[in-house]
Amino acid sequence: MRERLLEAAMALAAEQGFETCGLREIAARARVSPAMIAYYFGGREGLVEALYARAFERVSRRTRDFLERPDFSQREDGLGTLVRLYVAALTAEPWLPRLIASELLAHGASPLRSRLFGDLTRGPLMAMIGWLEAEQRAGRLRGDVDARQMAISVAGLCIFPFLIQPIVGDALGMGTGAAFAEALVAHAEQILVDGLLVRAERDAR
Amino acid sequence: MRERLLEAAMALAAEQGFETCGLREIAARARVSPAMIAYYFGGREGLVEALYARAFERVSRRTRDFLERPDFSQREDGLGTLVRLYVAALTAEPWLPRLIASELLAHGASPLRSRLFGDLTRGPLMAMIGWLEAEQRAGRLRGDVDARQMAISVAGLCIFPFLIQPIVGDALGMGTGAAFAEALVAHAEQILVDGLLVRAERDAR
DNA sequence: GCAAGAATCGAACGACCGTTTAATTATCTC
DNA sequence: GAGATAATTAAACGGTCGTTCGATTCTTGC
C-alpha cells in the first residue's frame, strides 16, 4: 500500500507536478482514503521526503555505476556516455525534472527538503564536476572552460528538453519516449563535441 | 496603484515564484488591501494575464529588434549575438524564467494563459528557428543538425542557469548580476561555437 | 473461533485562499 | 462647498487543503 501511494504520487508528479496536486487526488489515484497518507508517511512532508529519498537513491546509484565503471575514463566518448547517463536517468524517472522544478520554485525551504536537495546536487553534481576536471587534466576536454560551467551546460542541455517537452513538444515535433531520448542524446553529443558552426575539418571527414 | 501592484507581483514572482505566493502577500508588498487586486484586475487570473501581456510585449520587442537589425544576418558572430539577446532579456526580467516555469508546471491550462503562452513560444521561438534555418542555408551553421533542436539547445543553455542559480549558485560560485550574465554569455558562446572537446586547430590559434 | 493488532475509512476540524460586499474615504466637478 | 464618482478598506463568505479522530474492517497468532 505504501508502494502504491508512492507510485501514484510519482505518476501525478510526472503528469502535472507534485505541488499542484492535492493529497485527495493522490489517494484517489491509489484507490485509497487520503487518511492513508498520514498513516504511512505522517503527512505531506513525509511523502515528499520519501519521494526525494527514492529519487536520490536511484540517481546516486546511476551516477556511481557510471563513475566507477573501470573503462569509462579511458574511453574516447566519455562525454557522450555522460550525456547518455543523464538522458537515461531522466527517461527512467520522467517525473524527476518536474518534481525538482517544483521544489526549486517553492519558497521557505524546510530543513528536510533542503537537506535532501543538497545531497542530490552536491553528491552527483560534484562527482560530475570532479570527473570533468579529471578529463581536463588528461587533455581530453578543453582546459579553457570552467568545469563547473561545463557541468551546468551538460545538465541544461539534457534536462531542459524534458522540461519543455510537455509544452512545446507537439508544436516542434519533439516526439516522445525512446525516439525523443535518442534524438536528444545524438543532438547533445553533436553540440558538445563539435559546436554548431560549420567547420572545414568536420565536413572533410 | 495598478502599476505598484504589478511591480510587487513581479518582484515576488522573481523571488519565490508567482504560484506560491498569495494575493494577500502581493497586496501587502504593495502596501494595499488584497481587494485592490480584484478591483484593478478582476481577480488572480486577470493579474497573471497582465503579467504575461507585459512579458510578451517586452520579449517580442527584444526579438523583433534583434531580427530586424539590418546587419545581423551578415555578421560573423550571429550565434553570439543570439546568446547575448537571450541573456540580456533574462537579466532584464529575472522573474520571467520562474514565472514561465510555474505556469509550465501548473495543470489545467486556462484558455487565457495557454493563449498567451502559445504567443510567447510560437512567436519569438519560431522566429528564432526561422533565423537558424536561414543561417544554415547561408552555410554559416551546420546543416546536419535540426534547427528546432538547435533552438531548444540554445534556449536551454541560456535559460537553465537562471533556473538553478538561486539553488546551487552559491555552492558553485556562479556569481550574480552582471558578472553572472557575462560569464554565461562567454561560456555558452564557447560551447556553441567550438564544443567541449580538445581540438588541435583551436589550440593552434 | 476469537481476541489483538494493524489497516482502512468517512466525516469533521481548523487554517488558508481568492473573492465579494457593504461601508468609508478621497477626488473631482460644477 | 455639495454632490457624484472613484478609490480603498475591513470583514465576511464559500471552498479547498492537510490533518485528525473515532469507528469499522481485515489479518493474524493462538
Image (cartoon, coloured by chain):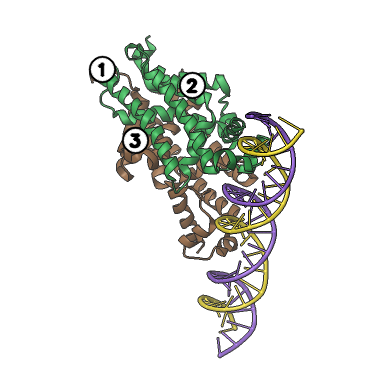
Chain colours: A brown, B green, C purple, D yellow
Picture coordinates of residue A190, whole percent (x, y) = 32, 28
Across and down, in percent, residue B198 comes to 38, 20
Nearer to us: label 1 or label 3: 1
The foreground one among A10 and D27 is: A10
Residue A28 in percent (x, y) is at 48, 62
Q: Name the residue under label 2.
A: B88
In the displayed structure image, the side of residue B93 where residue B197 appears, left or right? left
* Local SS, label 3: helix
Q: Distance between the residues labelled 3 and 2?
A: 29 Å
Which residue was labeled with disc 3?
A185
Looking at the picture, which amino acid does disc 3 mark? Val
Among the two numbered marks 2 and 1 on one chain, the one whose residue lies closer to the N terminus = 2
Label 2 to label 1: alpha-carbon separation: 27 Å
In the image shown, does B41 or B154 lie closer to the viewer?
Answer: B41
| D26 is higher (above) or lower (below) than B203 | below
For label 1, the residue is B139
Q: What residue type is labelled 1?
A: Gly
